[in-house]
Image (cartoon, rainbow, N blue to C red):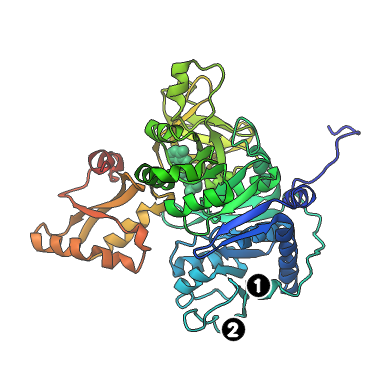
Amino acid sequence: MMLAGLMQQVPLTLNLVRERVGDLYPNKTVTTRFHDRIHVIGYAAMLDRAGQLANYLAGIGVGRGMRVATLAWNSHRHLELYLAVPCMGAVLHTINARLLAPDIARLLAHAGDQVLFVDRSIWRTIGREIVLPSAVRHVVIMEDEVDPSIDPPAPVGTPATLYEAAIAGHGSAFAWPDLDENEASGLCYTSGTTGDPKGVLYSHRSTTLHTLACLFADGIAMRERDVCLPAVPMFHANAWGFPYAALMAGAALALPCRQIDPVALVELVEVAQVTVATAVPTVWLGFLDHLGKHPQAVARIASLRRLPVGGAAIGQSFIDGFARLGIEVMHCWGMTEISPLGLTNVARSDLDTEETRSTRTAQGLPIPGCRFRNVDAEGVPCGRDGTTPGELRISSPWAAASYFAGPADQAPSADSFAVEDGRTWLKTGDIATIDRLGYVRIVDRAKDLIKSGGEWISSQALELQIMNHPDVREAAAIGRTDPKWQERPVICVVLRSDAAEPRERFAREYRDYLASFFPKWQIPDEVIFCAELPKGKTGKIDKIALRRTFGSS
Ligand code: AMP
């Protein structure tokens, strides 16, 4: 029953972030490291440009609920889109820039995007190949200028403009509408096991709550004094929510564009005096290695204090390596479907010294607002004994309840969601133990996907193409541990003939064969020829057995 005399009903929308930045932090800056220059802009000027951008978008007919796509690396312009698009009531659809043109076109069509903002460097690669869906009415190239001798022309029939030209001439004052907190703010696709991507539709409410959760002291603890460097792409689950969290906290931002190699990161940390940075472990493994080989660079990163790292597991040597440099690693876990943060590893005060050390590599404790459980094959909770593995499920105001584009009244798909205790639980596809204090440790993955350098590769999509090859009888793609990328795909193949000649030919040609279907980074590193593939009781290929035999490098 609702009693009279309740609190104000202020909608939780990203306008709270936008307004706060303008009110309190106009002099903070965002530094972008482009490949040829460092660009610095104050938050006040960035907000003015976001207003101009909103006016431009409104002028070309973008309204509430319409989707605006980006194909862009981490830059101040992308940040302007992060603010302007949701705050005007439209939906920001960030597309993975590492995909091939046909896959990008498929996402644009599925999302029903009306405008595409694309970095010039990305447009150079895909502009001549991509067949834009008819719904895309405008293309905006995110540069000051183009070079007609190199840059692809605009697609016939689709007006194209340059970002700076698009916003020039528009006023910075925009009539930001009052939004409902349950309106959509962002859309991000994640890889499905079959290779069909699944759309995750964030709301203003979910994104704002997630943003606030990043400010908790026993979590990411973003604060005003920080300078935050999200080296995770802004197309991957809102760069893990770090840009919005930094803006809300009043922290400055440092954006690396697409350069996340150690040399570029050292330079950006030094120039912007970065205190907190985030990316997948692969990036930091390379960084650590670089610092080991170039000890003189260590002084240049002296400002760096905290490293929330997620996307894949990390080991004790990783944590120790950074501790020796005075940098605290915080292990995090998340997924696109939960905005993405769910767990952060902080040492509880009731752990003894040995427990503190042994829990450091666990994925962590639920951040406030997230409930976790792990369940057995029948869906029965396993209990918190720290040893019984079960599938991890999550319920949270910032976790998906279904995937994008199902009819509104569609029941959540049983594959990915379960309704229990009157709540929707997202099935994460991760296998985990939970201990008595609530620490979650991921021990395996039930979903049949390979994660290389932080990005997913669908093993089923690889298998399907390989099985189409006339010489192949059976195939299974698995992830093999890799010191640099954490996992790389390899394929186990049974050929129709066991003669040497077709083997040699297949080993020689499979990369070219797959090159027209997959980007280079998704092509398996190696073929493992097998006489047969192990099968489970139901006749399905036993991937666990294959991973046990061939999964370690
Ligand atoms: P994504 O949706 O691309 O962000 O990927 C989410 C998935 O990455 C999770 O379901 C896990 O399988 C994996 N993942 C994320 N963080 C970690 C971590 N700290 N340790 C192990 N796996 C992780």
Task: Out of 87 and 383, give the one closest to the viewer.
Answer: 87
Give how far across and how far down residue 15 sits, in percent: 76, 52
User: From the viewer's perspective, is 454 left or right of 423?
Assistant: left
Q: Amino acid at mark 1?
A: Glu
Query: Which residue bears the numbered disc 1?
Result: 164
Q: Inspect the image, locate mark 2, and give the three-letter code of the amino acid beneath it.
A: Gly
The structure residue drawn at horizontal position 31% and vertical position 62%, both measured from the top left corner, is 465
Quadrant of the rendering where the N terminus is positioned? top right
Up the image or down, 1 lies above or below 158; here it is above
Q: Position of residue 385 (x, y in %)?
A: 46, 20
Q: Residue at horizontal 17%, vertical 58%?
A: 495
Front residue of 439 and 223: 223
Please state if 392 lies on the left or on the right of 203 as rendered: left
The answer for how far apart the CA atoms under marks 1 and 2 are is 21 Å
Q: Is residue 129 visible?
A: yes
Left or right placement of residue 106 versus residue 181 in this view: left
Q: Which residue is mark 2?
A: 157
